[in-house]
Image (cartoon, helix red, strand yellow):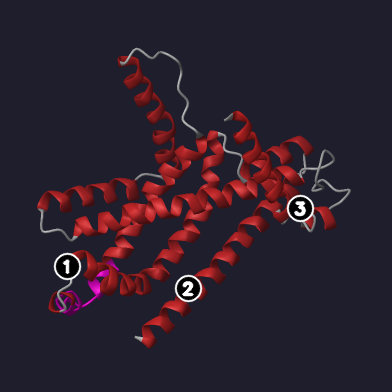
Amino acid sequence: MSGLSAAIYSGTAGILSIIDPFCGPAGIFRWFASGTLLACGDSGWGDEIAYGFLVTASLAIATLPLGLAIGFFIALAKQSSERSLRLSANIYTTIFRGLPELLTLFIVYYGLQILVQQFLATLGYEEPIEINAFVAGMIALGVVFSAYCSEVLLSAFKAIPQGQYEAGDALGFHRGKTMRLIILPQLIRIALPGLGNLWMALLKDTALVSVVGLPDILRQTGIAARMTKQAFQFFGVACVLFLVLAMISSVVFSALERSTKRAEMRR
């Protein structure tokens, strides 16, 4: 199994080294930053910053489906006829919209370690447990994202006429099929602009995870700045990289919005 894991790791590393836009064969740092502090290899910080970019993008992408899934069910709970579900959903969103994101991260990162450690201690396991910084960041940012996402989705649900649900009933669809075939396509189209704004906020919030040791863009450039005393240069690079992520995201969401509008016109 260890041999298989090593093979998978080396294969993945090989693929990433080829498609790496910074230090790959056609990488920006390799072609335009050779001989500078941004050079790839031992002579510069290009590899570290490229890895930080990958971690930041991976964290945001991993957090998105978690936040969307939780937010969707919270939005459904807020519309429930069951009073306890509505109350629980409102308490959830109030807490995670009210707490600072950094405090939520600390609670998840340190609090989960304590809870897991205490639980395992009751089972007789005394070894120290450390929560992975990536997982803690994904959970913390995911619950915060879901709290705001639920409000966006709730507004989108309210914008869909009740007649759409009745149309599903008239066609003999069960509730799940009505949701999948009739409601969800409209929900996505209506909620997409708001979700795009939340995604942009999520990209920026990933920088918070650097405080618990995750080697993201901000942490990697911060280490480079302290080691080289070139803070302006490296934090400037961090600014550019976050703006690149934002511009790519803007293009993607604009394309998605156009696609959903075309699909709506064809219906």
- Quarter of the rendering containing residue 175: bottom left
Q: Which residue is mark 2?
A: 256
- Counting residues from the start of the chain, the first of labels 1 and 2 encountered is 1
Q: Can you name the residue that lies furthest to the bottom here?
A: 266
In this rendering, does residue 145 appear at all? no
* Residue at image location 43% in from the left, 47% down from the top: 141
Kindly identify which numbered label has been placed on residue 174. 1
**Above-or-below relation of 12 to 261:** above
**Above-or-below relation of 136 to 127:** below
- Image position of 175 (left or right of 181): left
**Above-or-below relation of 16 to 223:** below
- Quarter of the rendering containing residue 249: bottom right
Residue 22 image offset from top left, x and y in percent: 74, 54
Residue 264 image offset from top left, x and y in percent: 37, 83
Q: In the rendered structure, which segment of residues is drawn in magenta?
A: 155-167
- Counting residues from the start of the chain, the first of labels 3 and 2 encountered is 3
Kindly identify which numbered label has been placed on residue 24. 3
| Residue type at the position of mark 3 | Gly
* Residue at image location 38% in from the left, 21% down from the top: 117
* Residue at image location 79% in from the left, 38% down from the top: 228
